[in-house]
Amino acid sequence: MPKELKTKSDDLHLIRLLKNVRTLRHLGDTELKEFIESSKRFKYEKGETIFSEGQIGTAVYIVLDGMFVLEKYGHVLKVLNKGELFGEIALIDERPRTGTVKAKTDGMLIVLQKSQIEEGTTLSASALMKIYRGFSELITSYLREGETLYDEMDVLLIQDGGCAPGYNPVTAYITEFLEKVGRRVFVAADGFRSIVSNMTSDYRCLIYDFAHFRKMEHIRGVEFAPPLRTARGADYRSERFPDFRGKDKQQQAAKNLIDRKVKTVVGIGGNGTFAGINALSAFLPDDIQSFFIPVTIDSDIWGTSCIGEFTGVEVGAEKIRGYMADARTHGRCYIIEMMGARGGYHALHSSLGAGAHLAVLPNSNYNLGKIAKMVNPRSETVIVVAEGYKENERKQDGYLGNAAEYFYDELIKAGLDTNQRVICEGFSRDIRGASPNNMDITLALRFARKLCDLISDGENRMMPAVRAGQEYSIPFNEINTDNSVESTLPSLANRLF
């Protein structure tokens, strides 16, 4: 715990130090004494946390001694030395802290609570006015630089659709490669919603080079990209935006991008994201380049490996192995729903990897009576059902259960009568948040490099692709989002007969 220290308002050393703080430069000696009387001084030991990311900010801090560091995702973004101020946004509004500050060494801070300024009981009117003047000048400079920064965006990334491992890594690598060739990368904070809303707060500026980031970190929305390389999830995506199917929204978004002088737009996601970026590109002039990067667990983009599919299969197979061990131990029949809306790639390959007894895909047409007959005498069974299995039939019947439950009901009607306890499990969404494995990280690197080459070569409306280890690209008008699995593979996932 930090130790509060007594502070004398007439401490000349402290007054001289505070005079060199930019936001306090308007205060005279008497007013600085009032500032000291209104503040508290704390001693921190090495490793102590001053505040954590996500906490609501209620105070501003000035370093009196020692060294402190600002961290995000475990990475040091800034070193704070003697005389430096931080946490100043809290005096304007009580927003969540955007990073964590820790003591790098033993040190001291002077802390001014926002309530001390608002109550005004220990600060004179002239001191308050000059403090607000200093902070308003600082914040205004931030806002002015921020507005100008987003007036002319170079490369804009748009993440959208369901989460999958690899969104963040490919975003980091795109930023790295493009920054090296002199391009500046921006990202929509909330997918397609942001480019329709089009407020300055709807965008972020990603910077990969640390020295460059240090020069711009004071501008709201400027973010350090390297931590994204290993981050789970997708920091800048929206949970789908159905309104974007409307041409009016697409046209408005295109106008917004033109007004902001965007030169290149890159969609990152699955089949729904491709549909959105493809529709948007139709309303953009030819001098604005459009590209798409496939990130999807279910590999629903034909003709290429997709970022996320390798991690998805690895994690999915491990989950199935757990069910198989439990089924063997307790004499159970598990019918598990897994991702696979169209072709069933994820469900199939997870089944193959784990050795499940049967994989039921969206286009499967098994003899249900034969399956029931084979399951009845067994002492353990694990069946994997893709989420897209007979989706249209289920909708037409008004069926409220999941695909696994539907298949179970079909088996009962076909004669299922087993001593095994049958348990149906809906698909687990935690796979979406898995840490991307090395295969997906490598794929993200290759897509980012290929994208950079396509942009530099002046290409347009293209998707980088990797198939059978070879890199190439596919034009938008040749991309097929109704992916299917190789016709001979499903038979390998039938171990019942």
Image (tube, rainbow, N blue to C red):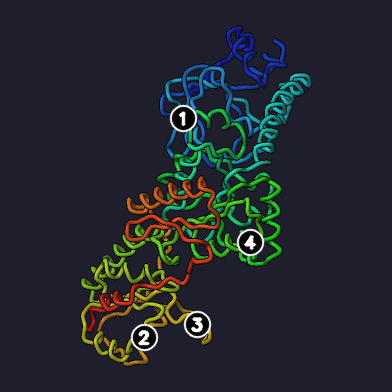
Q: Nearer the viewer, residue 47 or 134?
A: 134
* Mark drawn on residue 392: 3
Separation of disc 1 and disc 2 at Cα?
Answer: 60 Å
Mark positioned earlier in the residue sequence (1 or 2): 1
Left or right placement of residue 496 versus residue 404 in this view: left
Query: What is the C-alpha distance between the residues marked 3 and 2?
Result: 14 Å
Give the quarter of the figure containing the N terminus: top left
How far separated are the C-alphas under marks 4 and 2? 39 Å
Q: At label 1, which amino acid type do we have?
A: Lys
Dot placed on the residue nearer the N-terminal end, 3 or 2 = 2
SS at circle 2: loop
Nearer mark to the viewer, of 4 and 1: 4
Residue 173, quarter of picture: top left
Residue 414 position, x and y percent, is 34, 92
Q: Looking at the image, do the residues carrying marks 3 and 2 touch, with CB atoms under 8 Å apart?
A: no
Q: Do the residues under discs 4 and 3 have CB atoms within 8 angstroms?
A: no
Q: Which residue is mark 1?
A: 102
Tell me the amino acid under the disc marked 4: Ala
Between marks 4 and 1, how big is the CA–CA gap? 49 Å
Name the residue carrying label 2.
365
Residue at the spot of label 4 = 282
- The relative height of residue 99 versus residue 292 in the rendered view (above or below) is above
Instruction: Give the image quarter of residue 113.
Output: top right
Mark 2, Cα crowd under 10 Å, few <14 / some 14-19 / many 20+, is: few
Q: Earlier in the sequence, mark 4 or mark 2?
A: 4
Residue 285 relative to residue 278: left or right: right
Which of label 1 and label 2 is nearer to you? Answer: 2
Comparing marks 4 and 2, which lies closer to the viewer? 4
